[in-house]
Amino acid sequence: MTLKEQILLLLEHNRDRSLSGQELAQTLGVTRGGIWKAIHALQDEGYAIEAVSNRGYRLLKSPDALSVSYLEDALQKEGILLPVILKKETGSTNNDLKQLVNEGETKDLVLLADHQTAGRGRRGRSFYSPAGTGLYLSFLLHPHVNAALGSMLTTLAAVAASKAIEETCKKDALIKWVNDVYVPNENTLKKVCGILTECSVSMEDQTLDYVIVGIGFNVYEPDGGFPADIEQKAGSILGNVPKEENHRNRLAASFIHHFMEYYKSFPQISFHEEYKKRCFVLGKEILLLPTGCEDLPSATKDPKFPSVKALDLDESFGLIVEYPDGHRETLTSGEFSIRF
Ligand code: BTN
């Protein structure tokens, strides 16, 4: 940890009082001059640190910059000893992990980025990942389970993301079957979170060699808004609030914590109820669009695409639907996308 990171951590944990230069210097084993220089560097980076003579330094506001030391510290307190890698900018966090695997990485770890220049979404789409407003992270995991269970990790991530949003941002989070997370925004629901799970399967016994679970959160409204092609659907969790409450770090720490809590007992599914209570399609009339047709604007009026009632979820998160003639069917993820 750098000196700046150590000072920040101490200030963060003592927000209710000032810490003197002497106290900081002694705790960290450096000179008071060294502390003074590091505090100035932090102020230049946007941290509002009050400096009062005879009292010391107190953190008033932080610019919500992602911080490995904050995350490691928060995770350690929860007993989670997962290595954390943070990049300011990268192409795609999922691709980075694939590269690490190709270079021989065998440990579980999590990699976060402030900005992705080539963020990837499902079905070959891109995922808009601007700097400073979102949170893009991927887990590299090695669960010894049958490959068919891999998709459950996406579902697990959707529940963990919803809990983290509720806990740290105080917003309701809802899940659109199968795995997109939405937040209410000015009388509409907007997608604030997308998940892309990729895996490698052993040909020998059909178990997973490794899984990469990548998730992107739109935390704040991007400068200039979302691009035109996604602005109808995409939204941010917090909108235009000032970036000063360490929201992204707290959201990341909470998400990783909830994810790892559920992952501990995986493949046992301990999150079915939590998923179901947030799954906002249940009880609604929905339009079933076969994969590949989900973007057709005319689909709503096309009799080819049936309107059905979403009744319930089975234990594998299959969606039980009822057709107008009364017959029922259980849909599995990947077959269909739904629209209201
Ligand atoms: C989707 O909604 O289609 C899925 C989006 C997944 C985006 C995340 S951001 C972190 C990770 N890295 C990527 O390139 N994609 C995933």
Image: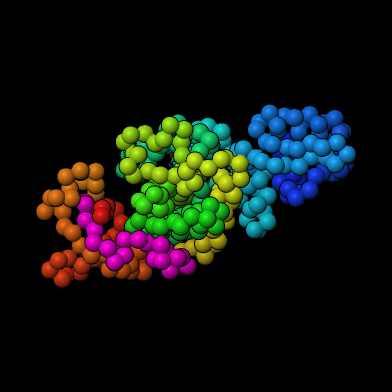
Q: Quadrant where the N terminus lies?
A: top right
Ligand 1: image quarter:
top left
Of residues 181 and 86, the one drawn nearer to the viewer in this rendering: 181
From this view, report whether residue 181 is shown above or below residue 32.
below
Q: How many marks?
A: 0
Of residues 118 and 338, the one drawn nearer to the viewer in this rendering: 338
Residue 239 seen in the current view: yes
Q: Residue at x 68, y 56 (%)?
A: 77
Residue 159 falls in which quadrant of the image? bottom left
Relative side of 234 to 298, left or right: right
* Coordinates of residue 174 in the picture (x, y in percent): 41, 57
Q: Residue at x 24, y 47 (%)?
A: 294
* Coordinates of residue 337 in the picture (x, y in percent): 27, 52
- Residue 47 in magenta? no
Residue 314 falls in which quadrant of the image? bottom left
Residue 160 seen in the current view: no
Magenta part of the chain: 269-290
Q: Quadrant where the C terminus lies?
A: bottom left
Relative side of 10 to 220, left or right: right
From this view, report whether residue 261 is shown above or below residue 100.
below
Of residues 86 and 184, the one drawn nearer to the viewer in this rendering: 184
Relative side of 47 to 275, left or right: right
Q: Residue at x 56, y 48 (%)?
A: 252
* Coordinates of residue 284 in the picture (x, y in percent): 27, 63
- Residue 270 in magenta? yes
